[in-house]
Amino acid sequence: MHRWAALLALAVVLVASQGWPRDAAAAAPAYDGQPRFDTALFSIKGPDNAAAQEFTTDDSRVEKASLYLASRAASGTVTVEVRTAREDPGSAISSSTRDLAQLGGGGAGWLDFPLGADVTPGTTYYLFAQATTTESKAIAWHGTRSPVGGSLTSWNYDLPVLGGWRAYTTRTAFFVNPAGAEGCGDPDACYRAVPDHVFAASTAGLYSNGKTTEAITPVQAYGSEYVRDSNVLRLPSGRWRYLPAGGTEPVTVHANDPGARRQISESRAWLKRGTVPGRTGPQRKAAARALLSMRALVQPNGASAAAWYSIWKYSWPRDSSYVAAALAHTGHTEDAYRILTYNASTQRPDGTWEARTTLDGAGPPDSRHWQLDANGWVPWSTWQWYQAAPRQTRDADLEKLYPAIEKAADYAAASLDGDGLPPASPDYWELGTGTPNIGTAAPLLSGLNAAADLARALGHDDHAATWAEAAGKLSAAIAERFAPLGYPRTVDGLHGRDSAAAFMAPPFNTAPADLRDALDSTYDALLRPNGGVVPGDDPGHDWGTSTWTPSTSFFGLAWAGLGEREKAGRVLDWVLSKRNVLGELPEKVDDDGNPASVVPLGWTDSLFVLTLLQLDRDDALPVPPRAR
């Protein structure tokens, strides 16, 4: 299935349905526009797909409607109708068709449809949209999953998946009788053709004002650029677009707008308060962008979103721990501490963490299985923050985090079996394994060593001794069971290589003597033609043709920590070459070498920054001391 099609199908599963509306129209407050278009909601490529949006208007005539559409197909047509009955083509009172080829081909943006339909004010009608093309490429109607006050129901028609129509709480992006800057009234937002590879990613960058974050779409990013060292976007027209202080929606303003200027100055001041690593201009530029993106993904309460789109818009203890470490070691220790306090606040009573939580800290968004590796990552990141934090305040700040460290380390120590290994648990692939895996064992080893050292720093020698003993048992078990097999994914050796072997290297663990050869052979086994690696080569899991920048970056960071500067530099250069048009780092790279999935990804940003720090100075990133 094409990635777009998969995302659209996923939208069907993720959003909640509503009851069927009454077909008999009744007077209602006007709902004739909704501007948000952050998500590709519904495929409208017929005859098996279409979509509709209920609307009411105070006007007596619909001269035109504007829809936010995205098409990977370069040819075909899109038809929009005003219907009185959603399912009945015969109820259409007006229809308009636009030709994709005449619009320049595949692209995205607000597209106007002249309709000229007489309507009754306050009556419910349906905007119906359906496309035709001979190409096997997606055509989607965008909108939002966020709540929209006073909105009416949107409808998805998907015959193969749904068997027909279904109502959704999502809302499509549309305007009836658009005025002013609505729809294509803003020339920077009009439908325009863009290269097909632009659509390989769902997001391209971030607007942020320190309180709220919004994604920049790939189409918005194409032909645009950030104003240097900021989250203000310079559009192709020369105007600027940004998220104003106190605002919740991006706005387009003239260049040098005072509010945008203030935000630019604040972003630059934040960067100057810390360190921007890198030995070359491109490295430092990419590092500054990565730092600003991590900052934008961290919410005021400390929740760190993995990325700002759909199923990535949650906080993972693993990803956020890396972000905290990167921010701490670049001098932004207060930002790092907010992440740590958030992770402490979302710890479960038994000392473990859910795989991910909603950004308000309310809990997990679904029933995904919890993951034991968080019990290693959170103490490790806390230890890394502690090494960088101001000495006059760090002990008092650590005391507030220590109860979470204690519960995490106690659980990790108690989880080890008689051989010293942790139980089978979903690893960073977020897939379960039947036997213990290196993606859990290595982080737990780092976390136990880190927790023991933090306990010693606060004078809790009894805790330190307990956790150091557990770390020693786990280290011995890894040496006995994983090392002879080359640190594979699972202890039974039946599930192939795993990029998590890099977790045995600095800055997580003091590297065993045999790790260098294991890393080389693992990297070679996972390398793909586009120059990146996949997470592993388990025969039971197909990663497809795309490669993963976090998995690739694991090796760069590990080799930097081992003093293998040339190898680390090659990985770093590859990651650097995969930035998108805004200089952001993606989660994935497709088989043609294009940024894919979501951009930016906080985990990749943090790995890039940590690797640069390590290469700038060999001892830049400390390693939790081995148990003693």
Image (cartoon, grey):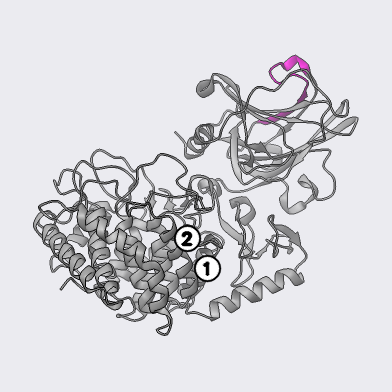
Q: Position of residue 38 (x, y in %)?
A: 62, 47
* Left or right of residue 265: residue 505: left
* Left or right of residue 109: residue 513: left
- Extreme residue in the bottom direction: 392
- Categorize mark 2 by other alpha carbons within 10 Å: few (<14), some (14-19), many (20+): many
Q: Secondary structure at mark 2?
A: loop
> Residue flagged by tag 1: what amino acid is it?
Arg
- Categorize mark 1 by other alpha carbons within 10 Å: few (<14), some (14-19), many (20+): many
> Residue flagged by tag 2: what amino acid is it?
Leu
Mark number, residue 289: 1
- Between 234 and 214, the residue placed more toward the observer is 214
Residue 115 sits in quarter: top right
Residue 524 visible here: no
If you read the primary sequence from the N terminus, does the residue marked by circle 2 or circle 1 appear first?
A: 1
Which quarter of the rendered picture does the C terminus lie within? Answer: bottom left
The answer to whether the residue labelled 2 contacts the one labelled 1, judged by CB atoms less than 8 Å apart, is yes
- Between 289 and 235, the residue placed more toward the observer is 289
* Left or right of residue 276: residue 517: left
Residue 261 sits in quarter: bottom right
Q: Secondary structure at mark 1?
A: helix
Which quarter of the rendered picture does the N terminus lie within? Answer: top left
Residue 253 in magenta stretch: no
Residue 89 in magenta stretch: yes
Residue 607 visible here: yes
- Is residue 127 positioned above or below 200 on the image? above
Residue in the image at 46% along x and 48% along y: 363
Q: Position of residue 508 (x, y in %)?
A: 27, 67
Q: Position of residue 377 (x, y in %)?
A: 33, 61
What are the residue bounds of the magenta stretch? Answer: 77-91
- Between 266 and 422, the residue placed more toward the observer is 422
Q: Which residue is mark 2?
A: 585
* Left or right of residue 342: residue 613: left
